Image (cartoon, helix red, strand yellow):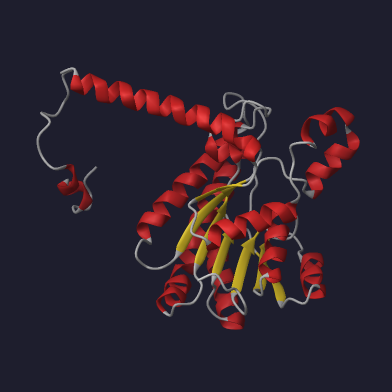
Amino acid sequence: MTDLRNALTVVTGGGTGVGLGLALEAARRGSRVVIASISDAGAAVEQLRAAGAEADWFQVDVSIRERVQELAAFTRVKYGPVNVLINNAAGGDSAGSIIDIDPEGIQRALNINVLGYVWTIQAFADDLRSNAAKGAPAYILNVGSEHSLGVPPHVMPLSAYTVTKQAGLAVTEVVRRDLAGTGIGVSLVAPGWVLTEQVSGIVSASEEFAAAVTPYAQETSEVARIAFDGLLSGRELIVTNPKSVPFAKDRAHRILSDLSWAEHREEAGAEWVHDGTGDITKCPVVHTPGLS
């Protein structure tokens, strides 16, 4: 179902940047919006209200599961069950090599960018199931990055960010499996450079950075429009920028090459730990808790 009139959208990290762009796009499509933000999102709420939307915000650190549960309770009591959950909040020290990165920085990045997604999905899952069962809109959109597609060769090392954004794709795939058959749509959007407030500030301060990034970057409104179009049409992976495609295809080709190597070894009679018999779909691990 693609009609969001009178639906309810929750956007984590929705006070600025891509999150605010997604909140504005949800409102443009008729949804009420609750922004979940660790910092004051009052200005974003006023912008949404000025555009004619019903909007509110709740202060929350998504890395703290109990606070996310409080967000869900607040939203449910005041506005009803959520229709669209957008996991956008991001944080942690992400710059530099994985070898040298500050331990606290990468821990914070994992807590927000990965566990934060898990906590919000757990908190709102019953709402989404309820709406889907009634035939109402029910969607989860995880905000990844082109870093979700691989290690971008055209970007400085942002190792913790890359790790967490690829983990975000894994979370998305697992949730699609876990919610299969419920009617809940689950997608990940993977933008490249976006002209957020932060990026625009760097562009203004550096001609070199501007020359390299501006021709490639997208406006937040464009990313948000593509994201919702993909989410509502059922796409699993929404790549907003065609410039992200070549390196992602290169990665996919390398993976396919390695898979082909494994397949051809078996065809050539290489020794394997199994004897080639049996039905993998009847693997007991699927049915037996505790086995690994």
Q: Is residue 204 left or right of residue 32?
A: right
Residue 164 appearing in the image: no
Q: Is residue 21 visible?
A: yes
Residue 51: x and y, percent?
A: 79, 72
Q: Nearer the viewer, residue 194 or 226?
A: 226
Name the residue rendered at 44%, 24% in the picture: 254
Q: Which residue is drawn at the image coordinates 63% and 54% (left, top)?
A: 226
Q: Nearer the viewer, residue 163 or 188?
A: 188
The image quarter in which residue 12 lies: bottom right
Number of residue marks: 0
Relative side of 77 to 28, left or right: left
Q: Position of residue 50 (x, y in %)?
A: 82, 74
Q: Quadrant of the C terminus?
A: top left
Pick the front one: 205 or 263: 263
Q: Is residue 206 left or right of residue 291?
A: right
Task: Tell me if residue 156 comes above or below residue 121 in the rendering.
Answer: above
Image x and y of residue 206, in percent: 88, 32
Q: Quadrant of residue 98?
A: top right
Q: Where is 216 relative to 4, above or below?
A: above
Q: What residue sits 77% from the left and 77% below the top?
A: 52
Q: Is residue 290 above or below residue 254?
A: below
Query: Left or right of 34: which side holds 173?
Result: left
Where on the picture, by quarter, is residue 184? bottom left
